[in-house]
Image (cartoon, rainbow, N blue to C red):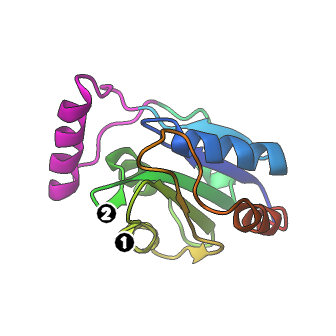
Amino acid sequence: MGKCIIVYYSMDGNTRQIAERIRSETGFPLIQLETVVPYTGTDEEIIAQGQEEVNRGYRPALKPLGVDLDACDTILVGTPTWWYTMASPVLSFLHLVDWRGKTLVPFQTHAGWPGHCLEDMERACPGARVLYPKAIRFSPQQFGKLETPQRELESWLAELKTL
């Protein structure tokens, strides 16, 4: 395959943890999505804003990525689950890419139910070939504690090395 990159958005660090693990295993470049207007406020305010954005399909403006997406054949895209789907910044990113002829590797992190996040990501990328979608569970009680079995995660990472 051609050039592969990892693109992710992380609010609390769980998705970042997985994206960095993928980078360490594969050596693929890593890009963190950042919104032009950052999310601010209390956790409750940010959660309410996220829910409102998801409900109306809002796509916030993103800071420049500094990469030529046309030169990328395979894009691994990571998101936290927001109200059963992808975070709004990831929705923005997916609509920036012409997915025809590209491969999408979607992954999401959650601390409860994964919802329909991976399916929504696939639907947002018409023309993409989708490989190795993965939902990764973290503890809802203990921040940053991975609950997906380590052997399951390692098996998925081994698949990614074949890209």
Horizontal arrangement in the rendering, residue 121 relative to residue 57 (left or right): right
Quadrant including the C terminus? bottom right
Is residue 94 in sight in this rendering?
yes
10 Å neighbourhood of mark 2: few (<14), some, or many (≥20)? some
For residue 91, side relative to residue 3 (left or right): left
Q: Which portion, as a residue range, is magenta?
A: 35-63
At x 58%, y 71%, the residue is: 133
The amino acid type of the residue labelled 2 equals: Tyr
Q: CA distance from mark 2 to mark 1?
A: 6 Å
Q: Residues within 10 Å of mark 1 (few under 14, many from 20)?
A: few
Identified at 79% across, 69% down, the residue is 159
Q: Quadrant of residue 75?
A: bottom right
Q: Residue at x 72, y 45 (%)?
A: 21
| Three-letter amino acid code at the position of disc 1 | His
Q: Is residue 135 magenta?
A: no
Residue projecting furthest to the top: 41
Q: Nearer the viewer, residue 147 or 3?
A: 147
Q: Residue placed at 77% from the left, 54% from the top?
A: 3
The spot of residue 147 in percent (x, y) is 57, 57
| Residue 8 drawn at (x, y percent) | 54, 45
Residue beneath disc 1: 116
Whether the residues at callouts 2 and 1 have beta carbons within 8 Å, the answer is yes
Please tell me whether mark 2 sits on a helix, a strand or a loop: loop
- Per the image, is 43 magenta? yes
Label 1: element kind: loop
**Number of numbered discs overlaid on the protein picture:** 2
**Residue beneath label 2, please?**
84
Report x, y in % for residue 76.
63, 57
